[in-house]
């Protein structure tokens, strides 16, 4: 008997009718002889609604109380799904993240899973139950406080449970039927990928393709758990995210992200140790820095820009204001009106001219590039936020259909 982990996103659980439909699919998987662990998200947009509610009662809600509030969303779905399964004569047990033994660090709002302990999930499965686990949450073993894993965190719960319980596959059921060459809401003629490698999916997810949380892909890659992204509304195969893919395209997809801001320190004296001082300060303020660009001018000063998540803007603003004084720089600025577009493809490694085509396509679309960063399989550009969707469409038109260059590896 093999174990299947199924994760259902908010849209798939948005109302009682959809919960009923999910129960039906889970029941069918169970009756066909599998052990089933189900990970649920909060219903519909409930997490957003709870965040909005918190803001109505407090300008600065404490992170601990925020986690107490948000974890309630997933508890509602898990209990309702368990009830719907009982009605179908399928024994089901719902568990919070803490009850399922999901241990995390202490970072409220963006905790990382550090271990999965205890065996309530295993005991439930052994007793013939479908075990339903609340996604997106865990507990810190030292403080015993409840934590949340960051937006989209139920994906991470699902893949981590799949690896801890040696599941054959982790199925992510969502409102699209797979991973597309770009967000189908922005590029209506984007194509569904049959498969994509962990490395490429990680770059896409880190670049803003919200269909999978980046950390879930990291866990899948580390423990070699194939992830099947598919729709809860149809039966069709979705996209397999796995180690080796049959065909390596130059370009697999284009991701975009409008949740970062650009911070610039102007006129920083150009001497050894300055960059270290800047990023040590940001690190101690727990600011996550993404892209970094430095321009040294003829006057012996440098302008240094970097991007940070919008949630970190205020801390970054304060830290850079202090740095201006400490380093005797000219000034600092924050521009939240930016976005990032990323082109991802493993075949880029062995193909010349991809960067030139990216810059030409953006130039022809009259889009100015403010920052550039690359990895061996990714090119990212920061552009004005109003131009982000046009940039995605321009790059998709330039690189679609992708050229197949080689057959690599074997089926995972
Ligand atoms: P869930 O609530 O099921 O976790 P999400 O909203 O987190 O669903 O993720 C699904 C959404 O991800 C889709 O509706 C789609 O708009 C968006 N998305 C962004 N990039 C992509 C992509 N490359 N392929 C598919 N969907 C994408
Ligand atoms: N409910 C949480 C969110 O909206 C977690 C998740 O859905 O994965 O981000
Ligand atoms: Mg999601």
Image (cartoon, rainbow, N blue to C red):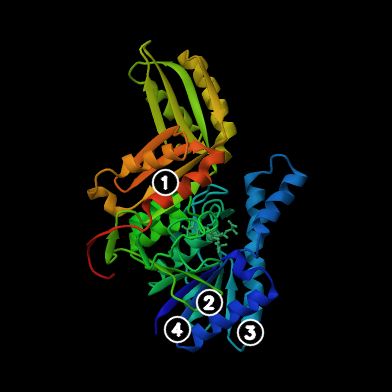
Sooner in the amino-acid sequence: mark 1 or mark 3: 3
Q: Which residue is mark 2?
A: 234
Name the element at disc 2.
loop
Q: Position of residue 36 (x, y in %)?
A: 49, 78
Q: In whole angstroms, how far apart are the C-alphas of marks 1 and 2?
A: 30 Å
Name the element at disc 1.
strand
Q: Which residue is mark 1?
A: 342
- Circles 1 and 4, Cβ within 8 Å, touching? The answer is no
Name the element at disc 4.
loop
Q: Which residue is mark 4?
A: 34
| 1 or 4: mark nearer the eye | 1
Q: In whole angstroms, how far apart are the C-alphas of marks 4 and 2?
A: 20 Å
Tag 1: Cα neighbours inside 10 Å, few (<14), some, or many (≥20)? many
| 4 or 2: mark nearer the eye | 2
Sooner in the amino-acid sequence: mark 1 or mark 4: 4
- Of the 4 image quadrants, the one containing the N terminus is bottom left
Sooner in the amino-acid sequence: mark 3 or mark 2: 3
Q: Residue at x 47, y 44 (%)?
A: 391
Q: Residue furthest top?
A: 299
345 horizontally vs 369: left or right: left
Q: In whole angstroms, how far apart are the C-alphas of marks 1 and 4?
A: 39 Å
Q: Which residue is mark 3?
A: 86
């Amino acid at each position: 008997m093999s174990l299947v982990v199924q994760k259902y996103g908010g849209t798939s659980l948005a109302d009682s009718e959809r919960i009923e439909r999910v129960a039906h699919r889970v029941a069918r998987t169970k009756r066909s002889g599998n052990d089933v662990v189900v990970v649920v998200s909060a219903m519909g947009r409930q997490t957003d609604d709870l965040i909005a509610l918190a803001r109505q009662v407090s300008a600065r809600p404490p992170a601990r109380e925020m986690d107490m509030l948000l974890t309630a969303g997933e508890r509602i779905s898990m209990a309702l799904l368990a009830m719907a399964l009982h009605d179908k004569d399928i024994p089901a047990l719902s568990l919070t993240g803490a009850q399922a033994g999901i241990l995390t660090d202490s970072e409220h709002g963006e905790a990382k899973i550090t271990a999965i302990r205890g065996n309530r999930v295993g005991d439930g499965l052994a007793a013939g139950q479908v075990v339903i686990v609340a996604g997106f949450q865990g507990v810190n073993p030292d403080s015993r406080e409840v934590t949340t894993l960051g937006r989209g965190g139920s994906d991470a719960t699902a893949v981590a449970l799949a690896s801890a319980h040696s599941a054959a596959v982790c199925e992510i059921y969502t409102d699209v039927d797979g991973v597309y060459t770009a967000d189908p809401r922005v590029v209506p003629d984007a194509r569904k990928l049959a498969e994509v490698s962990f490395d490429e999916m990680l770059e896409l997810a880190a670049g803003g393709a919200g269909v999978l949380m980046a950390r879930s892909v990291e866990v899948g890659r580390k423990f070699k758990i194939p992830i099947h992204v598919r729709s809860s509304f149809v039966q069709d195969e979705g996209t397999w995210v796995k180690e080796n893919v049959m065909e390596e395209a130059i370009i697999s997809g284009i991701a975009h992200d409008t949740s970062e801001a650009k911070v610039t320190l102007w006129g920083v004296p150009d001497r050894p140790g300055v960059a270290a001082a800047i990023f040590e300060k940001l690190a101690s303020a727990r600011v996550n820095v993404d892209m970094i660009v430095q321009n040294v001018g003829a006057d012996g000063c440098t302008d240094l820009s970097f991007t940070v998540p919008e949630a970190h803007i205020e801390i970054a603003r304060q830290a850079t204001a202090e740095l201006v004084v400490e380093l005797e720089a000219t000034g600092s600025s924050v521009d939240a009106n930016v976005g990032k577009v990323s082109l991802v493809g493993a075949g880029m490694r062995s193909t010349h001219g991809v960067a030139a085509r990216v810059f030409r396509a953006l130039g022809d679309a009259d889009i100015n590039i403010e920052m550039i960063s690359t990895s061996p399989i990714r090119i990212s550009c920061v552009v004005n936020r109003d131009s982000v969707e046009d940039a995605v469409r321009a790059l998709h038109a330039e690189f679609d259909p992708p050229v197949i260059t080689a057959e690599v590896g074997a089926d995972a």
